[in-house]
Image (cartoon, rainbow, N blue to C red):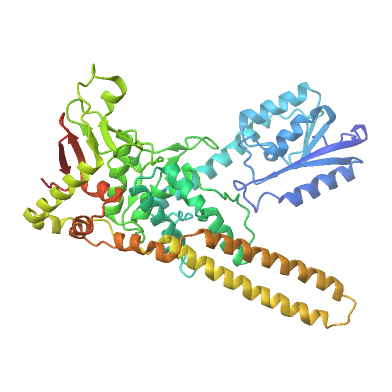
Amino acid sequence: MNPNTPFSDLPLLVDGYVRLSRDDNKSRYSSIENQKKIIEQFAKDNHMTVRCIYEDDGYSGYSFDRPDFKKMLAQLDSINVIIAKDLSRIGRHNAKVLLFLEEMEEMGKRIILIDDNYDSFYSDDDILGIKTWDNERHVKNTSKKVKRVKRLEQENGTLKCTPPFGYIRSPITPQKILIDEEAASILHMEKDLYLEGNGIRKIAQILNEKNIPTPTMLQKERYNSLGIPYHRKVVYKWNYSMVRDTLFNDYHNGIFRTHKRERNTINGKDKKVPKEQQFVFYGHHPKIFDDETVKLLQDTKNSRLNNHYRGQRKHTNLFSGCLYCSDCGSKMTAINRPDRKKYYICGTYNKKGKAFCSRSHLITEETLNTALYKYLSLIQDKHSDIIQTIKTPNYNQISPVFNYRQRLEHHIQKLKNELKTIISQKIAELSDSSYITPYLSEALTSLEEEKIKQIKETEKTLQNLPSFSSYNNTIEQTSISSTSDIWNKIITQNLLNRADIELLIDKILVDQNGNPDIFFKYELP
C-alpha cells in the first residue's frame, strides 16, 4: 500500500474480516478483539466507517470453508472494500489466496491488508506470491509438528482421549481409566439381551421401553449435578448405531487402540486405518467384559451375519440360527401356528419346494428340547473332565434394571429433600414483610412446582420398571460360574434359554426323518 495514497478517495463504508485458529502462534498473531481494534482504528484514521466485521474464530486459514468468510462472499454485491489485518487472515492456502485476490480485482473490489501495507487499488506487490507461500509453509510445518507429537503418543499408548461409554477418567489421576459402574450395568443389559436372541434394533426398543438413559443423557445429568453447562447434543432415544457401537467395542475388554484413522492432507477427510496397522495395547485398563464374553459375543455376531439373522420377532424361536438341513445345508425356518406345536423345516424346501430339496426335514421344538436334554445328560456322564476345563463368560452380574431402580429411588429422595428446602425457604420468606417478598414467593412457588413435576415423572419411570423380585429367577439363572453349572441348570431344572444355545451349540443338522445331530463347541463330541 502506497503511504502517500490519499484515502479521501476511499468509499465511506468498508467491511472488515478477522480470523484466528489453533495453527496460529498466539504471541505473533493478534487476538480476534485486537484485530477488530486495528481495523476500526485504521478506518477512523482514514475517515472510513466500518459497516460490518466478519469473524471466524477457531477456523484454519488453510481451508476456505469458513462460515463468516462464505457469508462475506455471498454479500459481495453490497461490499466495495474489505479490510484485514494481514494476508494470513484472508487464508494460508497459497493458490486459493492468490485466486481470491485475482477474482476480487476482476470484480472491482478493493482489498486492504494493514500490516502488509497492501492496497489492491494502488499496490503492485511483486513479492505477494512469496508471502502467500510462506503463510502456507507455516501451517504445513505446524501440522507436521502436531502429527509427529500425536504419532509418538499413539505409538506409546499415551494419547489422551475421552474414554467410551462404560468408563471415566479418575478425577485424582486423569491418566487412570476407571469403570463407570452405572454405564457398565447398561452394557451388561445390552449383552444379556443380545445373547438371549434379540437383534440390535430390538435391544434399542427394549432399552427405550424401560427408560434406560442414553450415554449423552447420563453425561448431561452428571454435568448438571456439578453445575457445569453441557453443550453437546443430547440424544434421548436409543437407536441401532448407538447399541452397536456401545456393545461391540473391544475397549470393554481392556484393549486400547490408537491410529485408527488418519488423513493425508490438511483438513482432508479422515480414513480408516486397517486393524493390522493400528497400535494395540492389551490390558490398558480394567475389563467390563472378560475374554470369554467377548468371544461369545463375536461368535454370535458372526453366526447371525452368516445366517442373515434379523433379530427377535413376535415369536421366540429358541433354535433359530443354529439349525441346518443335512441335505442341502440351508438354514431351517421356524413355523409358528396357533393350531399346532412350533416346528422347523428346511428353508430351501419352504421357499422353493421339492424341486430344490426333496424333503421338509420337519422337526418340532419339543423334539429338539428332548434330544438336547438327553444328549447333555449323556455327555455330562462321559466327558465331565472336559466340561470342567471349559471357561465360560462371567454371568455373576446384578440385574442392570435393579441398579437403575436403585438410582431412580436415590434421585427421588434427593428431589424430595430439595423440595423440603424450598418449602422451608418459602415459609421463611413469607414471614418477612419486606417489599421483595412477593417476587421471592413467586420464584419459590415456580421452583416448588418444578420439583414436584420432576418427582412425579421419576416416580412414573420407576413404576414402569420391573420389581426386583421379578428378576430373582433371572439372576439365579445367570449366576453361573462354570459350564458344569449350565449343564446342571438345564438338566435338573429343565431351564434352557437362547444364551445357553449360543454358548454351547455350534450347529444342529436335521436329516430327512427329522433326527437331529447336535454339534457342540469346545471340541465336545
Residue shown at 26%/24% (left/top)? 349
Classify residue 510 by image quadrant.
Answer: top left
Residue shown at 45%/42% (left/top)? 201
Whole-percent x, y for residue 247 in the image:
40, 49
Whole-percent x, y for residue 164 in the image:
45, 53
Question: On screen, 477 above or below 511?
Answer: below
On the question of residue 502 being in view, the answer is yes
Q: 8 or 337: nearer the eye?
A: 337
Classify residue 338 by image quadrant.
Answer: top left
* Image side of residue 508 versus residue 203, left or right: left
* Image side of residue 431 versus residue 242, left or right: right
Question: On screen, 398 above or below 108?
Answer: below
Whole-percent x, y for residue 410 in the image:
53, 71
Q: Quadrant of the C terminus?
A: top left
Question: On screen, 297 above or below 485?
Answer: above
Question: On screen, 446 above or below 344?
Answer: below
Residue shown at 64%/64% (left/top)? 454
Whole-percent x, y for residue 404 in the image:
48, 63
